[in-house]
Amino acid sequence: MRRTPLIVTLGLASIVCLGIAHFSASAQDPTPEKDTSSQPKLGGDWRKLRDSLDGLFDQLHKEKGIKAANIANDAVFIRRVYLDLLGRPPSPSEIDAFAPERKRADGLRGQAKREALIDELMATKEYAEHFAAFWRVVMVGRGDNWYDRSLENFLGTALHENRSWSQITTELVAAKGRTPENPAIGYLGSFENDKAAMTGITAKVFLGKQIQCAECHEHPYEDWSTDDFEAMQGFFRLFSVGARGEGAQRYWFSQDTEIHNRHDVSAKVRLRGKYKLPKYLGGDEYEFRSGETLRDSLATWMTSADNKWFREMTVNRYMAYFLGLGFVTPVDDFNSINEPTFPVVLEVMGKDFAASGFDLRYLIRAITTSKLYQRETSLNRSNRNDWIYYSRGYVRKLTPEQVENSIRAVVGIEALNPFQPVRDVPDSKLTDDEKRNKGIANAVNGWKNNLHRLMRDAYNGDPEIRELSDYDGTLIQALLLMNAPLLGPASLDNNLKKILRDYGSHKDRVYQIFMTVLGRKPTKDDIALINGFMPAWTGQDEQRYEDLFMALMNTTEFATNK
Amino acid sequence: MGFDFTVSRRDFLRASGAAGGLMVSSAMFGNVLRAEKPVRNTKIKSVIMLFMEGGPSQLETFDCKPGKKTAAPYKVIETEVPGFAPCEHLPNIAKRAKDLLLIKTMSSREGNHSRAAYLLRTGYIPNPTLKHPSLGSIVAHQLGDPDFELPNFVKLRGAPHPAGYLGVNQNPFVISRPGAKIENLDYAAGVDKDRMDRRMKLVKEMEKDFAKEHGNEATEAHKAMYEKARKLMDSPLRKKFYIDDEPQEVRKAYGQGQFADSCIIARRLVEAGVPAIEIVHGGWDTHDDGFKRCQELNTAIDQPWAALIEDLKKRGLYESTLIVWMGEFGRTPDLTGTSGRGHWPNNFCAVLGGGGVKAGQVIGETDPDGLGRDSKGQSLIKDPVSPADLYKTLGVMMDWDLTKEFEAGNRPVWLIDKGAKEVEKIYK
């Protein structure tokens, strides 16, 4: 009843609005789950989910008269998938190993080969580190406090072991014990015992529900009052993070007041003079279970397979990350006037994700092996304006983390100056070789840390107030890519020096520089362009090719995934 | 074999493919709007926002209630302006009473830091489907010359609040360590203008090919930022970001510390013609040890702020520079055990001065005990000013395009909330 006039006043003249009455009707329909006859077993096979997605959108393109872009070739696919899964472009040797003419030992070809690559990449530590960084930005931003590091460390381990998303969430929301044994405490520790922030951010990150405004007043378009907020916040009321010790010995620990029985007054929240039990957002009262903290109970409710919000939030976040477009935009704002573009698809994907045991890699496999993910970004008359149906790959701006990883990989300092362990003794007792190694290690770390600091400054100026949204750090990013000492100090080896050392001819050098920086071969046009410009460039070879190398790092192509 | 999605399919067939396009593409790459240098009927040329992050206590700054139960054990300084009686740790500002206008009754409902800061920076409550530009971005857009060599909005410390629908050119240029050398502003060692030119010429050509194949959303944003960055790198006005060549007596007048340095830089930027500056001074979230911390915070801002006014006056720039002092909310009348206070959006202070402001007056009144609300929760303040009202007033004072409909995604949006009312007393 209430919806229609609201939409009109807000003037949401987008697709979201055009289809809303219908979508919400279908969202309220009995879920298709019960009709098991025509549905495959949920969570059993990501290929089935993928095939359904492909089939549906193929059909849609046909009906809409859209000619979808072709499936991208291996060269385009490999850069895309490396950037998305590892946060960096592939190296020339990785590209070469994936080339169509290179046979895999297991004989896999075509799509099967791509599927195998995706699995191989997801098994690497780099994958875990990249997604640990991704999730920690979502959860706590880009700061550099104990809790940021602790959380990222926890996520890295958890993602590498492929713990389920429900387990990871539980370990964060109900974290117990102390650091460093349990680094998961970093998540709740980041709120510095600000329970309102803890509640608001937790609802937003894991459930896609933006309830922060209800801390102070009724939600403008949901039925959430300040009481609902307080009742939800009640789950964190008996909890705090404390710290002991100084310097390197300092550690952080969680503490919860024990609840003895269901009538225990300590569990209750005072609302308008009355003591009431905490309430799961928009729903039931807290259910007492002996030996459990309030947070345990909250985590159980949040991560239940029946919790639609929990299932769909992460599906949507990964759709948006991998495809440049989720079903709900902004990605973490599910509300009654922001309906999904494809509610039933989201619903089914959410249930399938839940049935898989909240297996993130299951979800990633279904998305990244789909045609939706693999299409070229090329435009034609009919798909040029499609921002809904995934009829082409959407060019995506790299995240700051991807930019930083890409710079590191492309410049190659760490790989070319591998860290040599040095005995922990005063310099005077080191051998000459060890001294040299130590000098190199320091220089490499200095370069890496400086790059990280520059990126953080460019994207997150203020660690005090959480600004979780991405920022167009454009001017600062441009200055960084043009002027920062990205190629490292002269004492260190980098990919450019290596190319100039290993390849003598102009043609080979241009080829290698393209492969290294942009992850692709130069086209005929590229070569013509460079041969038109470069002969007039003055200076030594080092300078001329450095100019080419740096120019490529300053292109849109470098800074996007296409 | 697969899942049957047909239940939903007929529903979204009606959805138009083109409608969401602009919204999504600009969300990915930011709007790039080309604009002419605007002409405005105002004498205000620059705005300096002094943003006190964390929520400065009204009761320890400009709305003290000495002797009352919850007051700090501090005196106030009575001034020639009735009602303008700042805390004793703001003696220099007290001397400037006639140059300032105090609003005692800024009022909102947002008591969460990030939401309230958003509201006070933009005049709108946060809306997840669109980013409203902050004051600096609006001023940059409304008063700034798009071809100006320096950024039209310089932010000294703080988070980079994006300009949203006004386009990436109005994003703040954030200086994280004011006064220190700004990194990457200079050509790298061994790279002169010629070398950078040839790199960028090649980039430009490659961008054309990229746009042909993948569309120009990404390349347009890229081009805009690189053009601006190059202009900035080559501008002699860059020295305005630094204070090394500022005479000793001037530095002395402003005093020491990051806020003082930021105020000097702000004045230099005003001189250079930068229309929008925001200085962020944090630490005001005084839940604990509030009395002592407020004393320190007041002391840190008092001399530099007063010196900034004085200095601008001396240079004949005060009448064309509007200075706004405020934070995201005030603090509770009730004290915590450690003389701290909680968040209190019910009533808090803002101080305006300079261009267009009818200074030497106080707007709004709070109850004598400073409780803000009675026991039934009824507000006790007179003449509340909402953040949107303040923004509307600033908009009128600067002759912004208040009726112009901007587009964010495919929905209309205005610089100022249409329901806002200007507070004429501020300028009339």
Image: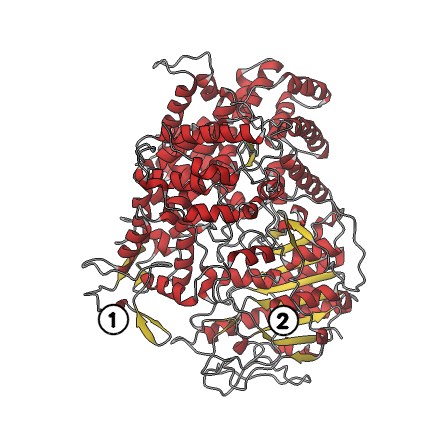
Q: Nearer the viewer, mark 2 or mark 1?
A: 1
The image shows a total of numbered marks equal to: 2
Question: Is residue A57 shown above or below A202?
Answer: above
Residue placed most toward the observer, B259 or A478: A478
Give x and y (percent) for residue B73: 48, 83
**Looking at the picture, do discs 2 and 1 lie on one chain?**
no
Q: Residue at x 40, y 19 (%)?
A: A113
* Disc 2 residue crowd, few under 14, some 14–19, many 20+, Cα 10 Å: many
Rendered image: mark on residue A265? 1
Cα–Cα gap, marks 2 and 1: 52 Å
* Disc 1 residue crowd, few under 14, some 14–19, many 20+, Cα 10 Å: few
Residue placed most toward the observer, B112 or A511: B112
Q: Which type of secondary structure does the marked residue at label 1 adopt? A: helix
Q: Residue at x 47, y 20 (%)?
A: A95
Q: Is residue A327 left or right of residue A543?
A: left
Q: Residue at x 64, y 72 (%)?
A: B351
Amino acid carrying mark 2 in the image: Gln
Give x and y (percent) for residue B125: 56, 61
To which chain does the residue with label 2 belong?
B
Camera sees residue B242: no
Contact between labelled residues 1 and 2, with CB atoms less than 8 Å apart:
no
Rendered image: mark on residue B344? none
Residue placed most toward the observer, B213 or A402: B213
Q: Which type of secondary structure does the marked residue at label 2 adopt? A: helix
Give x and y (percent) for residue B160: 58, 52
Question: Is residue A236 shown above or below A534?
Answer: below
- Quadrant location of the C terminus of chain A in the rendered image: top right
Give x and y (percent) for residue A546: 61, 26
Amino acid carrying mark 1 in the image: Val
- Reading the image, the residue beneath label 2 is B303
Residue placed most toward the observer, B305 or A185: A185
